[in-house]
Amino acid sequence: MRMRFVGRDEGLLNMSSKREKQIPHPAKCAGIRDDKSGNTGILRCWPAPASSELTGCRHSRVSGFALVVKFALAVALLGSASAARAQKLQMPPHEKVVLKNGLTVLLLEKHSVPMVSVAGIVKAGGLADPAGQEGLASTTAGLLRKGTKTRTAQQFAGDIDFIGGTFEADAGADYSSFAAEFLSKDTVKGLELVSDAVLHATFPQAEVDKLLAQSVDGVKAAKDSARDVIFEYYQGYLYNGKGYGRPTGGDENSLKKIQRDAIAKFYDTYYTPGNTILAVAGDFNSAEMKKKIEEVFGGWPAKVAPPVKEEATGPMKGKKLLLVNKADATQTYFVIGNVGVSATDPDRVAIEVVNTVFGSRFTSMLNEALRVESGLTYGATSFFSLQKEPGPFAMFSFTRNETTGKAIDLTLEVLKNLHMNGLTAEQLSSAKSYLKGQFPPMIETSGQLARLIVRYEFLGLDDNEVNQFERRIDGVTGEMAKQAIARHFPLENLTFVLVGKSSEIAPMAKKYTEKQDAKEISAPGFWTGAK
Amino acid sequence: MKIRWDKRVPLLVLAAAMVCVYMASAQEYPVATKTLKNGMKILVQTDHSIPNVALYTFYKVGSRNERPGTTGLSHFFEHMMFNGAKKYGPGELDKAMETNGGSNNAYTTRNVTVYQDWFPRTALELIFDIESDRIRDLSFDPKKIESERGVVASERRSSVDGQNEGVLDEQLWATAFIAHPYQWPVVGWMSDIEHWTIEDLKHHFEMGYSPSNATMVIAGDVTPEEVFALAEKYLEPIPAHAPPLPVTTTEPAQLGERRLVVHKPAELPLLMIAYHVPQTNNPDFYALNVLRSILFQGESSRMYQRLVDKDQIALDVESESDNAFDPTLLLILAQPKQGVDPQACEKAIYEEVERLQTAPVADRELEKAKNFRLAEFYRQVRTINGRANTLGTYEVFFGDYRKLFDAAKNYSGVTKEDVQRVAKQYFGANNRTVATLLPESGEKGKP
């Protein structure tokens, strides 16, 4: 939603808006303007432009689903074309250093513009929130810049703004993250600000109260837009309020239960050097940067953080449907899917190839059927949210109230066709070209690279994700695609979530599942699985 | 082949003028330009760092060139530009592009329609073939028109009906402008969406899509020589015709505050305030942007500090202003917190505006605003996509892409007096339109 959050995608991990993080790009492209680019626009929209800094679906605060998908496929080839530039495209060289206090530091030099990007991961996110206090990790991250031992929130804002820099922090389910960006001439100041927030946050009571009150209202404001919240409901309902089904940004109930003490304790427990990975990429000399980092982060006392317990959830059995009533809706938003795969699943490359054909690009089977052929919607898509443990797989679209049943039927039919017909040799080859051709702009900037290497480090992946990407994509055979379809594109066991005008769509929704649940959008929370 | 090389502009030298000591890794963004015989202008910015290309085509036609009854036509036409021409029939454009590793998008504004292609360099000639096909021989399949009508209606439901700020924004422009075509929404009124005809589309193509009305910008792993050769082969033979008629309507000066209220089911209220400001190429562009930085950019900005941090009456407050050929609006958007009367936000906003009008800004605030703009410049030019878009935007709205490289200098020239002057000149009560969305609960609309 353009109004509430002015942050740019660039330089952010999965932040920008807490409430927006679950939105895949297609929905977000509709008629959105971006102050940064000076474009007002109604967008034809589809695949979020590979490097969407300025235009296109720039509103796609990619994160949540879309972001992780991008990361996971991330692959690539840097370098250049033309005969003389025929060298293999590679992840730019980068260095890993572990400081004495246990902090892992990744350094990647990139001198194309005089800027420095920082991306950090603290290995505890929403999954570490105590039950009933969902949003604790996210609130803790949000407060890092809201008061330190030497700066008030206002002073911190003044200092980072003065150098034209950015600092943002938030939490996803797996981890908390922070990101900063500044001109390289301001490196000393920029690093000092990052370390001040991460090492010396003090959580003043007044700031805690302020942020929590804002977050509660933020949830309410998000509920004014179905597409801003449908994935909160979907994740909650799919995982029945457990694990990835808990809202990492919190809800109207859980946020009210968060106390300053719990925040301070979360910070004290998990924000330790050994539990943190810090990536710095951009216009600097690595040897000098190492020294500077040692200066500002070396004094962070070593301390052991307990690991966060994560439990893998397999696909859900059976069918169920949640209808969220939004009484003024003129169109229904719907998501259908099941639990998918993790970011390290051995089938991830084959899945990506299949999903390119099935639902991720403009000419995908879903978009062809629901948009191009029938005009039912502005967009239909499918995606896998690739996280540490199996995240959701989702098919998503929206259509006017009267055509809701038709659009859902068509979605299920396209899914059935995928199983019946598989991929043609032509589709397979086209998807491979598409993925390879669209990749390089995903690792074009220092901000993108910093976020990529820090995430690989967290997931235990290596540069082969990039260096071997083309080879891995090319290696996906028809048989592998067939197996990926059978294993990972569920046909029978499906969870449905619809957000729309119940009085018009409830009768139609009855035919899909025996188990049905209902909720008012204005009722507090998303889906906690309490029942 | 003649290639006109523009003077290479060392960006950092200009930037240095602004921040005094900054002379790090100086870099240049050389741009080669060529104007084809049919009047189409081509800009090429070579960058071999990734084997990819961003290609933007700007047409100077947007909803300002429309008429009542066919509002939204520019945007609908933009959709139809993907739905089939002579060589690449319906669906074939997207298929050919994606099969060759490319993707595309487009956007329409009140002023321009912009087409975007992102592709590996190996697809360069294919893209020229596709672009020339649809500029020369677009076809209109009645069946496609009907299905695309449904797509656009869905887009409107999603971006206007489904978003409170979409509803309010539309009402605001319709109230702030009484004469000029900026008054209608880019996506068009629903009743117009339902009634466009094939003749309307054909007329729009005739009117807006002469090659002489287009600027193409290519950034990435290409050379000017190869691009210009392809442009000569594929684009130059397309004949020019008359450009759109000038938009002659001038919005009369606003003589007093205008107010409007939208009642709809919502969790939270919403507030938008609009002031009439000059078109993009007006010299006050820079002072107004500095003013916006001081008021709205970052959490240390005056409005954030006042409304979000100190008074705690808003979740967010920000401003927007679009590039425009004609005098346009500067919008202020505030999301009041629950239980807060939007008028409390309004009052705080006016007090901050007044403070800017009555006392000069601090030196540090002015410098901060300029630093913001410098960092923004680098964020814009650090990708081939950003460079293609930004160069094209400056070329189209300022009449010269080199103005991009003058931006730092122009911002550094803004004084405290300039900021105070534009605050007084444009932010008067008579010049504003105030739109408020008040929540109703449930279908019956009970407050």
Image (cartoon, coloured by chain):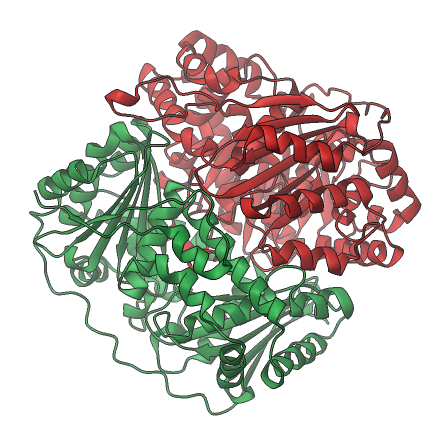
Chain colours: A red, B green
Write down the quadrant of residue B98 in the picture. top left
Taking depth in this image into account, of B447 and A187 the one nearest to the observer is A187
Q: In this rendering, would B304 be left or right of B224? A: right
- Looking at this view, name the residue that lies furthest to the right: A261
Rendered residue at 25%/75% (across/down): B247
- Looking at this view, name the residue that lies furthest to the bottom: B255
Up the image or down, B176 lies above or below B310; here it is below
Q: How many marks?
A: 0
Q: In this rendering, would A24 be left or right of A279? A: left
Rendered residue at 72%/77% (across/down): B344
| Residue A63 in view in this figure | no
Q: In this rendering, would B207 be left or right of A281? A: left
- Looking at this view, name the residue that lies furthest to the top: A479
Q: In this rendering, would B195 be left or right of A308? A: left
Percent across and percent down for residue A308 are 81, 25
User: What is the quadrant of the N terminus of chain A in the image?
Assistant: bottom right
Rendered residue at 68%/80% (across/down): B347
| Residue A319 in view in this figure | yes
Write down the quadrant of residue B328 in the picture. bottom left
Taking depth in this image into account, of B57 and B217 the one nearest to the observer is B217
Rendered residue at 37%/41% (across/down): B384
Taking depth in this image into account, of B87 and A163 the one nearest to the observer is A163
Percent across and percent down for residue A344 are 61, 17
Percent across and percent down for residue A4 are 62, 58
User: What is the quadrant of the C terminus of chain A in the image?
Assistant: top right
Percent across and percent down for residue B273 are 56, 75
